[in-house]
Amino acid sequence: MVVGGCYRSGTSALRRMLDCHSRIHCGPEVKFFPDFYSRVNGPWDMLHFLPSARTLVAEDDLLEVIGSGFLELHDRAARAAGKARWADKAPENILYWRQWQLLLGDRCSSSRS
């Protein structure tokens, strides 16, 4: 489950409710997409992982590779919490719906409210 919305709209309360569910792990916010898409500007750009990785493959390919690791972290966190499913909550998730669809593939259902 992916939760997004406006800041100060109750998404944190929803995250806590989801995490209380016996089968859903919804940990604290992980700023994956803002970090993934941030650009380091300056003479030391190539000393940072993502700017240098962007020189190797197209951005969608990089998202697939790095994003699969992000999904695996969610899977492992859910298992460590003894839960079968996970949810990611960050208000800005709404801005990255296309990227979530790419990462989740057929696990993604498009039910927005």
Image (tube, rainbow, N blue to C red):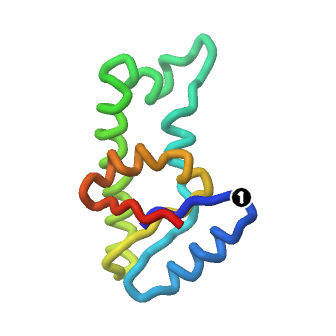
Query: Quick check: 81 left or right of 61?
Result: right
Does residue 52 sit above or below 72 in this rendering?
A: above
Mark 1 is surrounded, within 10 Å at the Cα level, by few (under 14), some (14 to 19) or many (20 or more) other residues, namely few
Report which quarter residue 25 is drawn in. bottom left
Q: Residue at x 41, y 78 (%)?
A: 24
Query: Quick check: 2 left or right of 73?
Result: right
The residue furthest bottom is: 22
Across and down, in percent, residue 44 comes to 57, 16
Across and down, in percent, residue 82 comes to 35, 82
Query: Quick check: 104 left or right of 33?
Result: left
Across and down, in percent, residue 12 comes to 65, 70
Does residue 1 sit above or below 51 in this rendering?
A: below
Report which quarter residue 40 is drawn in. top right
Q: Secondary structure at mark 1?
A: loop
The residue furthest top is: 43
Q: Residue at x 28, y 61 (%)?
A: 107
Q: Callout 1, which amino acid?
A: Tyr
Does residue 10 sit above or below 62 in this rendering?
A: below
Q: Residue at x 63, y 68 (%)?
A: 11
Is 24 or 69 nearer to us in this picture? 24
The residue furthest right is: 8
Residue assigned mark 1: 7
Is 83 or 14 nearer to us in this picture? 14
* Quarter of the figure that contains the N terminus: bottom left
Across and down, in percent, residue 39 comes to 57, 26
